[in-house]
């Protein structure tokens, strides 16, 4: 674990409703780093929001009560990294007002006559906007363009100024907002998007660089950003790219996959306008986009374990006085079913690892890990280190930086492996 870093500042910046006393500190904000708190920064590939916890702040001035801090204030933060990390290409870890992190809650408050002790939670302001925004208009076109419209353009959407990195989908889609929340709608669209006809599914998430609407296939095809090794050394002897600790959280859950229809499912579409029914069957063994589909005993992977019922909305397809049928419902069902299977199998092998504090890591990055076998005949005969089957490429699904003034810093990763790798 690394302790060669310096926390330059942790500041609260006033918002429109903050007290006059806090506003007097202006754009620089009020520095709370003197309270020696523990900082934890979080990213999650399944969540379009960042979060930061600043815990156990010791405040002899009792400014929480003095300034009336209850929520809505902005966070700025800067951690200066060590010279060794800078020489390796890393940059200082910095959160500015452009990241739009606001105070969500003050908790664990304890007060004595001499001091206060409390913790703060910050989240992306867009996460709050999502709770009040409702989509109402008709959306039509490439799904990636629809996502951009929802996040940046639509007046009833998020209207974020953050960057959006997106992959274009192969298919188009048409729907009416129906007063749904923006983020819920984008997550609803993700399994409907296809990168090609054989390997489907998108992920929607936020990291320090902004929002991402990315193809699962293209994420898995990226080159590893770093390679981490587990060495037979003590923590003090380990280098920057050593795995300090590792633990496999879970492997393939057959029962859960059967319940959610990963291996085989049946979708029934009913067109209310024409009163016609369309049935689409899906089997993972027929999905040529998955190189090594799982095989189950008793042919369990051949029988539908999930039935899905969908109503076709003819109103959404209406454009002017004519119906605009751009995509068959059966094709959409195939994309969705492949996407569900792809996503579920992607999460079938999950591991936690701890590494040295690395400011260049993001959720959505690929890394390679190498876990050697025990030093025995397997290694001594060959004269080189052999690595276990657990080694390989992994996608970062969760990330947490922990920074402690009195102890040290580290980066904790939850990583997922594409066990049934796509072509």
Image: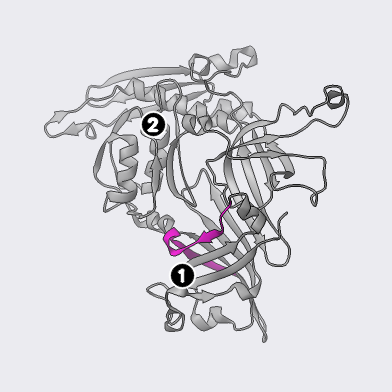
The residue indicated by pointer 1 is 73
The magenta stretch spans residue 105: yes
Residue 193, disc: 2
Considering depth in this image, is 316 or 236 the residue closer to the camera? 236
User: Tags 2 and 1 in contact by the CB under 8 Å rule?
Assistant: no
Magenta-drawn segment? 90-107
The magenta stretch spans residue 326: no
Considering depth in this image, is 9 or 422 the residue closer to the camera? 9
Tally of marks: 2
Q: Residue at x 64, y 29 (%)?
A: 253
Q: Determine the CA span between mark 2 and mark 1.
A: 37 Å
Q: x and y percent of residue 373 in the render?
A: 80, 30
Q: x and y percent of residue 115 in the render?
A: 65, 82
As drawn, 200 above or below 151:
above
Q: What is the crowding at mark 2: few (fewer than 14 residues within 10 Å), some, or many (at least 20)? A: many
Q: Quadrant of the N terminus?
A: bottom right
| Mark 2 residue element | loop
The residue sitting at the left extreme is 321
* Left or right: 217, with 129 as reference point: right
As drawn, 202 above or below 67:
above
Q: What is the crowding at mark 1: few (fewer than 14 residues within 10 Å), some, or many (at least 20)? A: many
Q: Residue at x 36, y 25 (%)?
A: 332
Q: Picture quarter containing residue 114?
A: bottom right
Q: Which residue is drawn at 58% across and 45% down?
A: 398
Considering depth in this image, is 386 or 332 the residue closer to the camera? 386
Q: Residue at x 60, y 12 (%)?
A: 299
* Left or right: 297, with 277 as reference point: right
Q: x and y percent of residue 79 in the render?
A: 59, 63
Q: x and y percent of residue 237 in the render?
A: 80, 49
* Left or right: 135, with 19 as reference point: left
């Amino acid at each position: 674990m690394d302790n060669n870093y310096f926390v330059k500042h942790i500041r609260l910046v006033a918002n429109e409703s903050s007290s006059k006393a806090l506003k007097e500190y202006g754009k620089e904000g009020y520095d709370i780093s003197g309270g020696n708190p523990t900082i934890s920064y979080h990213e999650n590939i399944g969540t379009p929001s960042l979060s930061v916890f600043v815990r156990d702040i010791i405040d002899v001035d009792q400014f929480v009560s003095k300034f009336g801090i209850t929520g809505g204030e902005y966070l700025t933060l800067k951690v200066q990294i060590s010279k060794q990390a800078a020489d390796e290409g890393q940059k200082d870890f910095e959160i500015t007002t452009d990241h739009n992190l606001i105070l969500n809650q003050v908790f664990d408050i304890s007060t004595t006559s001499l001091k206060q002790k409390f913790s703060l939670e910050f989240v992306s302001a867009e996460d709050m906007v999502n709770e009040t925004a409702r989509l109402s208009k008709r959306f039509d076109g490439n799904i990636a363009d629809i996502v951009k419209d929802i996040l940046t353009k639509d007046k009833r959407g998020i209207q974020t100024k953050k960057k959006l990195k997106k992959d274009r989908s192969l298919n188009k889609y048409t729907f009416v907002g129906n007063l749904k929340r923006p983020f819920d709608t984008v997550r609803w669209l993700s399994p409907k998007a296809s990168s090609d006809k054989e390997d489907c599914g998108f992920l929607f998430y936020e990291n320090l660089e902004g929002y991402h609407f990315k193809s699962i296939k293209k994420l898995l095809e990226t080159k590893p950003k770093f390679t981490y090794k587990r060495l037979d050394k003590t923590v003090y002897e380990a280098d920057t790219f050593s795995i300090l600790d590792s633990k496999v959280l879970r492997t393939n859950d057959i029962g859960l996959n059967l319940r959610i229809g990963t291996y085989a499912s049946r979708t029934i579409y009913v067109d209310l306008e024409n009163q016609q029914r369309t049935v689409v069957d899906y089997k993972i063994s027929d999905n040529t986009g998955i190189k090594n589909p799982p095989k189950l005993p008793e042919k369990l992977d051949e029988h539908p374990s999930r039935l899905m019922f969908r109503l076709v909305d003819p109103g959404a397809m209406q454009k002017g006085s004519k119906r605009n049928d751009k995509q068959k419902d059966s094709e959409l069902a195939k994309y969705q079913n492949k996407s569900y299977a792809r996503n579920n199998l992607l999460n079938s092998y999950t591991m936690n690892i701890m590494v040295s504090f690395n400011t260049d890591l993001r959720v959505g990055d690929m890394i390679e890990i190498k876990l050697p076998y025990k030093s025995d005949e397997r290694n001594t005969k060959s004269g080189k280190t052999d690595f276990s089957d657990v080694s390989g490429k992994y996608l970062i699904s969760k990330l947490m930086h922990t920074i402690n003034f009195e102890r040290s810093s580290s980066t904790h990763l939850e990583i997922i492996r594409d066990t049934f790798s796509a072509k």
